[in-house]
């Protein structure tokens, strides 16, 4: 794992935007794996800026999001569908049918998981996968105890994740209890993985990741089994 230590959140976002820009410019049909949450918002702002300045086009890009809450309609203000529209898709020239996010409202969630995995196999794997890290070590919504061989599946969110994400909702009660997430194995198929971590809240998770021991109780540790991972971490999250 390559480790890039940057000063702060802005520098982390800039570094990541550089890697995404390189990927889009170098690949004929780039496939990006995208994350949500607070971590990649700065990255998306920079990508939108590069598009507006005509430095980047997303016309040939396909995107796969890691996860979606179960039970939230795509128009729900806290759904990841809506998040992606608000932070990225509605501001750039990516064709709608080239963006994929699991459907958390699907009548059959199991069928939706299989369908998403098929799409990943057909168009993927991502050339570059953006990841954040949960305070409990989750990647996507693969919670502690997740199988490293897992594909896209339904997951019950850990209490610690619901508590951490309650800051995005009006109250803890509103945070969905379940999500669809790409599995650890689906994530590890990506050609390159960029893991972003910013702020003191992430320092313990980053520390544990750097211990380097694969442990299903700490899902991010699966990344130590991948040959092309860049951890972009700011000084606070690195604990220095
Ligand atoms: O960036 P946050 O809001 O701290 O969340 C950490 C990670 O957990 C997830 O929200 C789970 O989907 C990631 O997408 C995110 O990067």
Image (tube, rainbow, N blue to C red):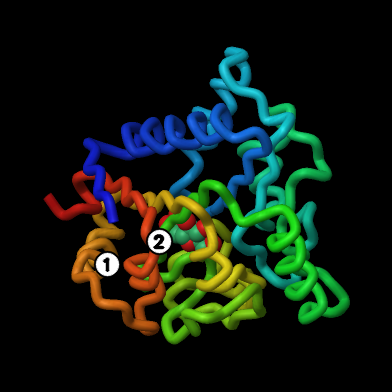
222 left or right of 176? left
Can you see residue 167? no
Task: Work out whether 207 lies above or below 148.
Answer: above
Taking the spot 74% from the left edge, 33% from the top edge, the residue there is: 94
Circles 2 and 1: CB atoms closer than 8 Å: yes
Q: Which residue is mark 1?
A: 209
Give the mark toward the camera: 2 or 1.
Answer: 1
Q: Position of residue 36 (x, y in %)?
A: 55, 53
Can you see residue 141? yes
The residue sitting at the left extreme is 240
SS class of the residue under badge 2?
A: loop
Q: Nearer the viewer, residue 76 or 59?
A: 59
Quadrant for residue 154, please give it. Answer: bottom right
Q: Position of residue 54 (x, y in %)?
A: 62, 14
Q: Nearer the viewer, residue 83 or 89?
A: 89
Quarter of the picture holding the N terminus? bottom left
Mark 1 surroundings within 10 Å by alpha-carbon count, few (fewer than 14), some (14 through 19), many (20 or more):
many
Taking the spot 77% from the left edge, 44% from the top edge, the residue there is: 98
Q: Is mark 2 within 8 Å of ligand 1?
A: yes
Q: Which residue is mark 2?
A: 133
200 left or right of 240? right
First of labels 2, 1 by sequence position: 2
């Amino acid at each position: 794992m390559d480790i890039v230590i940057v000063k702060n959140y802005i520098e982390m976002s800039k570094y990541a935007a550089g890697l995404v820009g390189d990927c889009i410019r170098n690949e004929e049909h780039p496939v990006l794996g995208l994350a949500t949450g607070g971590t990649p918002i700065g990255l998306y702002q920079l990508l939108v800026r590069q598009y507006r300045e005509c430095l980047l086009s997303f016309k040939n890009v396909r995107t796969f999001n890691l996860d979606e809450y179960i039970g939230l309609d795509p128009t729900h203000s806290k759904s990841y569908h809506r998040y992606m529209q608000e932070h990225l898709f509605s501001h750039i020239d990516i064709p709608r049918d080239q963006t994929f996010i699991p459907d958390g409202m699907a009548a059959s969630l199991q069928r939706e998981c299989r369908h998403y995995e098929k799409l990943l196999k057909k168009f993927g794997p991502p050339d570059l996968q953006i990841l954040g890290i949960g305070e409990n070590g989750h990647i996507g919504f693969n919670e502690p105890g997740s199988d490293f061989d897992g594909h896209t599946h339904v997951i019950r969110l850990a209490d610690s994740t619901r508590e951490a994400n309650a800051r995005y909702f009006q109250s803890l009660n509103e945070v969905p209890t379940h999500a669809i997430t790409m599995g650890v194995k689906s994530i590890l198929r990506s050609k390159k993985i960029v893991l972003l971590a910013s702020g003191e809240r992430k320092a313990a998770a980053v520390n544990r990741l750097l211990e380097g021991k694969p442990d299903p109780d700490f899902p991010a540790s699966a990344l130590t089994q991948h040959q092309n991972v860049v951890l972009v971490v700011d000084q606070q999250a690195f604990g220095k």
